[in-house]
Image (spheres, rainbow, N blue to C red):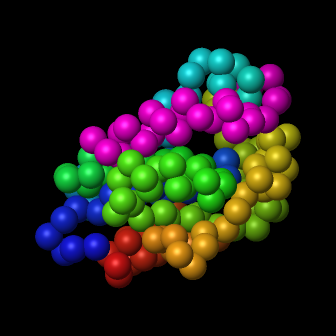
Amino acid sequence: MSHHTAPLVVVMGVSGSGKTTVGRLLARHLDVPYAEGDDFHPAANVAKMRAGHPLDDEDRRPWLDEIARWLAGHADGGGVVACSALKRRYRARLASAAPRVFFLHLDGSPELIAARITARRGHFMPPELLRTQLADFEPLGDDETGSAVQIDGTPQETAALARAAVTAT
């Protein structure tokens, strides 16, 4: 990434990995807009997840299309968006809309993430769906622009790792 261009980052990972918290901290540090990926879901997707049913690829298509539009609209000025981006083909869809996007994978143990999901309140994603997300997850490939950071520290520590990963490129 050019040092003269604000980064465009997708903070990715399974539910409960800290995408929102770290994404907001990262956007604030980079002085770019932040978007919450959950806000791009159609109401039917939210209802399906709230009922304990995992989304399939067809459910995710309009959601990914909306996030891709957001990324394309922020390609020049930079931005940070939280999006699970679990599968390589989802990331390819997002990268096709904004070729210089950087994928930041928030990585942690299933036990840590399950504990976080169980502890949070007011989110539509039930803890039971973590298993399906972990099964669907495809790690970043060597040919994908991005990096993984561990989430076992505080949100501020994780955000510092995120900043270092994003600005190192």
Q: Quadrant of residue 56?
A: top right
Q: Quadrant of residue 6?
A: bottom left
Q: What residue is shown at x 27% (from left), y 41% (from top)?
A: 73
Q: Quadrant of the N terminus?
A: bottom left
Residue 166 counted in the magenta span = no
Q: Is residue 1 above or below residue 57?
A: below
Q: What residue is shown at x 36% (from left), y 59% (from top)?
A: 99
Q: How many badges with numbers are in the image?
A: 0
Q: Quadrant of the C terminus?
A: bottom left
Residue 52 counted in the magenta span = yes
Where's residue 152, x and y in %?
Answer: 64, 70
Q: Is residue 42 above or below residue 28?
A: above
> Does the image show residue 149?
no
Q: What residue is shown at x 62% (from left), y 59% (from top)?
A: 88
Please state if 71 lies on the left or on the right of 112 as rendered.
Answer: left
Please state if 125 lies on the left or on the right of 10 as rendered.
Answer: right
Where's residue 143, x and y in %?
Answer: 53, 75
The residues colored magenta run 50-73
Q: Residue furthest left?
A: 4
Q: Quadrant of residue 31?
A: bottom left
